[in-house]
Amino acid sequence: MARFPDPAAPAAPDTAAPPPPPAAGAARAGSLGRRMTVLVALSIAVGLLLLVIAQSRTAYRDMRALSEAGTLALTERLAEEVAPLVRWRKVPGIEAFLDRLAADPQLSVAAFAATDRQGRPLVRKTVPGRAAYDLDDAFNRAQGALVRGETVNVSTSRHFVVLMPLRFGRDQIVVGYLGIAWSLEAINRQLLTGILQQVGMSVAAAGLALVVLLTLLRRTVARPVDQMAAAMAALADGNLDVEVPKVGRDDEIGRMATALAVFKDNAVERHALTEAVRAQNIQLKVEKDNAVRLARQARTAAEDLRVAKERTERAMAELKAAQDHLVQSEKMAALGQLVAGIAHEINTPLGAVKSSIGSIGSNLRSLLALLPALLRDLTPAEEELFLALVAEGTRTDRRQVTAREQRQMRKALTTRLETAAVADPRTVADALVDMGLGETDVERFLPLLLGRNGRSALDAALRLAQMTQGTGTIASAADRAAKIVFALKTFSRFDPSAEMITASLRDGLDTVLTLYHNQIKHGVELVQDYQPVPPIPCRPDELNQVWTNLVHNALQAMDHKGRLTIRLFQADGRAVVSIADTGCGIPDDIRDRIFEPFFTTKRAGEGSGLGLDIVRKIVERHGGTIEVFSQPGHGTTFTVRLPLDQTSAAASTAAPAPSQDVPA
């Protein structure tokens, strides 16, 4: 029978069909059997290898563990015998004892050593013909554990080393240390012999199993599959007269043969339907042309929709840009009001740095002229006391004392110095107190103060202490200025396209309070109640704008005089920030309008009326809520609640919050 044509192909001229080519599967007959032979042999080889490796490793670990346990017990018994010899330092007796160990071939000793209690070697010995081991290096590395009275085991591929303290007497005091390196060569040879025997037996068993398994696979699988493969190749070449092999078995291969026969019958039926399919192709072509025309019309409509979408997106982008501009404008307006205070806050630490540098320079010039002559005139004992006085005076870990404590210390020191007949005790006491020394410290330095160069030494030590204090002042001032600059940089940064990140609410609050420090420290009592709250998903720049507006409004409501309370805590699975003031409060008739855009009760030029509107939108964008509680004449409290997890922050659609605090 001729090859059956493709139903989708156009009708071909009726010509004589060429004779069918020879079946392609005939040339590959038996290939499945060869592959099965290779795969089975490879599987058995791999399984054999894994089995040998697993059994070898298990046998090696078991033999090593058993040998090491016995060796450790034997070493402990030997330590009991050698401990008296080490206690009485009977070196010949120790050598004789160790020679007996080396002469015993059953013990497999490679090296040993005995030391006294201080770790000094009494006897060292290595056994010729066995792998050497450096016991001195082992003693050095295990020194800490041996001193604590612990036994140290070291296991290598060729040795098992035991280092243990030698105990003697009823009190079991440590009189020395014993180290023995036991050779594992005998165990390794025994294991190798066992592995080779096991490999030989496994190879023989695997060979027999391979022959039996391959014979069964060829008869039951490879031969029927090769026959069916040849028939399928003939069917694929269009030869529908091929004879399908019959397999009288109710298994997968039998079902494959049955399915192949059914496939052949179906192919004959499909060939009969080819002409009907060709007729249908003509109708399909007409329908395709109609579909192309409709698709062209749909593309035109889609293009019009795309243009309309682009216009809408441009309008939305322009609206968002305007909103972002308003947020940044509000932030820059608040920053402009803070500039003078920030400049004062930065000038204060810079002034402290300038003053400290001048003091350090003056003291340094004086010391360059004073120290060489002083060190020449001091006796060795006085020089030691002088250096100790300098060390005490330049310590940076002393506890800060109050002015009252300094007066008490100065009075007590003056009395003690007068009793000791120190010249000008009042001045000396002032210097010692400035250096942080008390009455308990002065006893140590009385010989120096009573000496001929006592005043010069005290003056030099005081100047060094003042230089140390100056460097501490510079470091503290630099940290303060850096903190202000960092807060200013963090506050001024604005990225409207920023994605949510995990950030700390406490850091944002501290940044805003740093910028408002100059306005808060004069007349405002700041109360901070921060409870542990984990970082939350948010846009920190936007939340900083929220805290800025609320703190700014609170300060204005109090006229910068009163108490500002900021709380941070968790409640009902949310992070809560509360900002309360003791200002004038919000009248009841306008409380519902304070979040309306451009609504403000401030004088012209003091506010745009957008602050609280922006605050509400930022909080809602974070999936949170903002609430206000206010009593006219008693103050206002704004409460912001934000989700603790990313899912809630992204999916929450909070309803507009009730009216809130101080007018924007």
Image (spheres, rainbow, N blue to C red):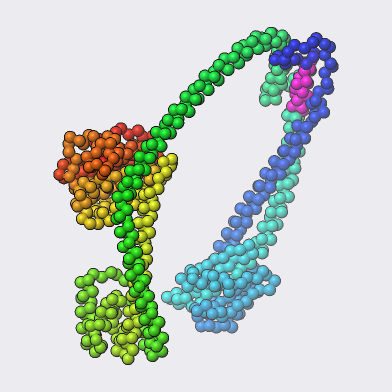
Whether 337 is drawn above or below 139: the answer is above
Residue 232, percent from left and from top: 75, 22
On the image, which quarter does residue 390 sit in?
bottom left
Residue 140, percent from left and from top: 54, 73
> Which quadrant does the C terminus fall into?
top left
Residue 349, percent from left and from top: 33, 63
Q: Let me know if residue 513 appears in the view.
A: no
Residue in the foreground of this view, choosing between 238 and 664: 664
Q: Residue at x 32, y 56 (%)?
A: 342
Q: Residue at x 42, y 34 (%)?
A: 318
Q: Which residues are magenta?
A: 223-241
Q: Let me know if residue 490 appears in the view.
A: yes
Does residue 232 belong to the magenta stretch?
yes
On the rendered structure, is 351 left or right of 137?
A: left
Does residue 659 belong to the magenta stretch?
no
Q: Residue at x 72, y 48 (%)?
A: 201
Residue in the foreground of this view, choosing between 248 and 291: 291
Q: Residue at x 33, y 49 (%)?
A: 335
> Which quadrant does the N terminus fall into?
top right
